Amino acid sequence: ADCSSVVLFDEKSPRNEPSVQLFIGCKSGDELTPLDESIVNNGEAQVIGDYSQEGIFPPHDGVRSAIIAPIMYQGRNIGLINLHSNHPDFFKSEATELIKALALQAGVALSNAQRYQSEKLSAEFVRRRADTLTRLTDVSYKLDQDLPLEQTLQTIMLGIRDSTPFRVVLVSI
């Protein structure tokens, strides 16, 4: 191949109207071509032997043939792999099978990366929540029945301030 590109779709976009989240490669833009949309809809890789013979506009100047493969995971199209050649009929069936296998592996890897990020965010939330609860528990241990009301309220306010994102705590009696 003379050039290539990878398109990743926003996971929150509807299945039938994917929006481009990330584009890396030889062609710029965030719009899918009609050929890309067709591949997204049918979920099958396609080989274009010669753009000029098939009456399809090439993605950019100089491209004569291409392989476009969907990146699928659990029946959902999460992106596209595009390989372009400046020569007609450049891609043989072996190359097509290899690109399909790579696209399948890319789908699994991308899904794993997204799940990892999600789990990492969840773990951070749980850690912050546990830290907040620990700080509030520490405040309850500092409270004593013999403390004057003003000092008790001061201890509670400091505990709230130290265990939450609030920098100012007001108490009205």
Image (cartoon, rainbow, N blue to C red):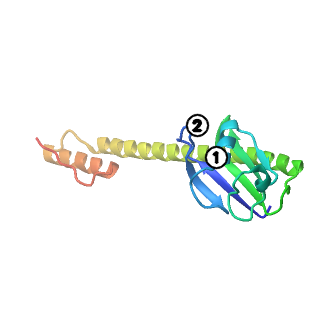
Residue at horizontal 56%, vertical 40%? 17
Image position, residue 77 (x, y; %): 65, 41
Image position, residue 169 (x, y; %): 21, 50
Residue 69's tag is none
Which numbered disc, 2 or 1, marks the residue that appears first in the sequence? 2
- Quarter the N terminus occupies: bottom right
Q: CA distance from mark 2 to mark 1?
A: 13 Å
Left or right side of 51 for 127: left
Which residue ends up furthest to the left in the rendered image? Answer: 173
2 vs 1, front mark: 1
SS under mark 1: helix
What amino acid is found at the position of numbered circle 2 in the picture? Answer: Asn
Indicate whether 55 appears above or below 42.
below
- Quarter the C terminus occupies: top left
Residue at horizontal 52%, vertical 44%? 123
Left or right side of 47 for 133: left
What amino acid is found at the position of numbered circle 1 in the picture? Answer: Pro
Indicate whether 126 appears above or below 64.
above
SS under mark 2: loop
Residue to which mark 1 is pinned: 34
Q: Would you call the spot at circle 1 few (<14 residues within 10 Å), some (14-19), or many (20 or more)? A: few
Residue to which mark 2 is pinned: 16
